[in-house]
Image: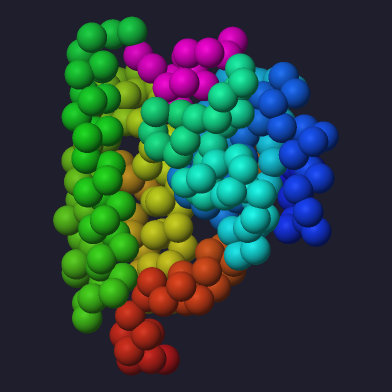
Amino acid sequence: MRSNFLHIKKPAGLVPLSFFLFDGTARLYVSHTCPFAQRVWITGNYKGVQDKIKLVAIDLEDRPAWWGLKVYPENKVPSLEHNGKLLGAGLDLIKYVDSNFEGPSLFPSDPVKSDYREQLISHVDAFVREGFTSLKSANPVQEASPAFDFLENALGKFEDGPFFLGLFSSVDIAYVPFVERFQVVFFEVFKHDVTEGRPKLAAWIEEVNKIGVYTQTRTDPQETVDIFEKKKLINIQTMHDLV
């Protein structure tokens, strides 16, 4: 939960390094509004390792100088401090946390599901790219339709649950932070429900919103819209046409 965050603001010097960096504690550096960081945050929650991995909040609008200069030169979140090293952003962090900490696995043992997982993971970057590109287009709803149709068609392959691999898995974690944000922006800005005509996607969103390890990581919807507008990720003219 967010109450477990250690919030780091830009310090006057580099004093914070001396009192916590590489002291043997595992730390996940995140921003609560970053979808990439949210993936690893959900993973840790699902594994039940909240008492083993400390969350450290990095303010992306005011990143501490020591963070990029002395800790993680990539200057991005998420990153994981574990066993004396810092591991960088990317889907690999989901696998790392799953493999190196106790708790239920997010990766299937069934070879059929494993193969399907690889297919879906290989497409996640394209889905994210198509979603963001559509928001800048003259017709966001039409442009985003193939991306959401892909999700609709990808769901329902297995009968043991409503998620991509039947049961909740790393595939759901890879997609849900971005589906969350796109759903909010399309509804709040463009007055469009991305689940319209997509019953499997609607059921998936409904079920994932019942999972506490995910819902406690969600960003406030208005904050999501504000971030997208501030970063100019939305076609302003299209917004004005809808008013």
Residue 147 locus on image (x, y percent): 22, 53
Residue beneath the point at 61% across and 17% down: 83
Residue 30 locus on image (x, y percent): 60, 44
Residue beneath the point at 59% across and 58% down: 60
The way the protein has been coloured in the rendering is rainbow
Residue beneath the point at 46% across and 73% down: 231
Residue 35 locus on image (x, y percent): 48, 49
Residue beneath the point at 72% across and 19% down: 24
Residue 42 in sight here: no
Image quarter where the N terminus lies is: top right
Along the line of sight, the residue nearer the viewer: 146 or 131 = 131
Answer with left or right where residue 57 lies relative to residue 194: right
Q: Quadrant of residue 62?
A: bottom right
How many marks do you count on the picture? 0
Image quarter where the C terminus lies is: bottom left
- Provide the residue span drawn in magenta: 94-108
In the image, is residue 100 above or below residue 27?
above
Along the line of sight, the residue nearer the viewer: 81 or 49 = 81
In the image, is residue 204 above or below residue 135?
above
- Please check the rendered image and state whether residue 83 is part of the magenta-colored stretch, yes or no: no
Q: In which quarter of the image is residue 140?
A: bottom left
Answer with left or right where residue 132 lies relative to residue 60: left
Residue 187 locus on image (x, y percent): 42, 68
Residue 67 in sight here: yes
Answer with left or right where residue 35 lies relative to residue 29: left
- Please check the rendered image and state whether residue 103 is part of the magenta-colored stretch, yes or no: yes
